[in-house]
């Protein structure tokens, strides 16, 4: 008599809830494009997408643009929350 145990189902991963600022990012990812929000005042990238620029505190943003490399060349994992102190 053998005992076969079924593998436990993988836990469900929560899906991100798009916000007004992050909606273009997630739509781009769905289409295979890496879209980044840019500040309309200073031109710097805002990632993660958010309403206020962490560099100049402007609330104006330009339409997201495709990053220079549409394909990621490496993987990364965030061990802590992103902080912008630059
Ligand atoms: Zn800015």
Image (spheres, rainbow, N blue to C red):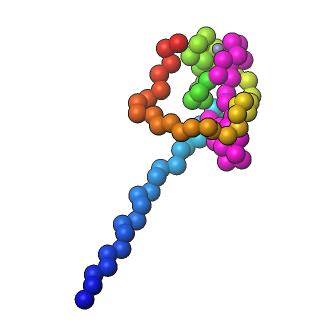
Q: Is residue 12 magenta?
A: no
Q: Please report the bounds of the magenta region as a residue range.
A: 22-45
At a point 36% along the width and 74% down the height, the residue shown is 6
Q: Please tell me whether residue 54 is drawn above or below residue 19 in the rendered image.
A: above
- Give x and y (percent) for residue 72: 63, 38
At a point 67% along the width and 30% down the height, the residue shown is 36
Q: Is residue 12 left or right of residue 43?
A: left
Q: Please tell me whether residue 49 is drawn above or below residue 30 in the rendered image.
A: above
- Give x and y (percent) for residue 14: 47, 50
- Give x and y (percent) for residue 67: 70, 31
Q: Is residue 46 left or right of residue 83?
A: right
The quarter in which the N terminus is drawn is: bottom left
At a point 47% along the width and 26% down the height, the residue shown is 82
Q: Is residue 27 visible?
A: no
Q: Is residue 75 visible?
A: yes
Closer-to-camera residue (69/62)? 69
- Give x and y (percent) for residue 64: 72, 30
Q: Is residue 45 left or right of residue 65?
A: left
Where in the image, quadrant-wise, is ligand 1 located?
top right
Q: Please tell me whether residue 49 is drawn above or below residue 43 in the rendered image.
A: below
At a point 70% along the width and 45% down the height, the residue shown is 32
- When asked about the image quadrant of residue 57, the answer is top right
Q: Is residue 19 left or right of residue 4?
A: right
Closer-to-camera residue (56/68)? 68
């Amino acid at each position: 008599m053998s005992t076969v145990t079924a593998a436990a189902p993988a836990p469900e991963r929560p899906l991100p809830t798009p916000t007004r600022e992050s909606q273009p990012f997630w739509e781009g990812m769905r289409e295979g494009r890496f879209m980044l929000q840019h500040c309309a005042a200073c031109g710097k990238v805002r990632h993660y997408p958010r309403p206020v620029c962490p560099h100049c505190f402007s609330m104006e943003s330009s339409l997201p643009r495709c990053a220079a490399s549409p394909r990621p060349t490496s993987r990364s994992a965030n061990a802590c929350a992103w902080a912008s102190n630059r």
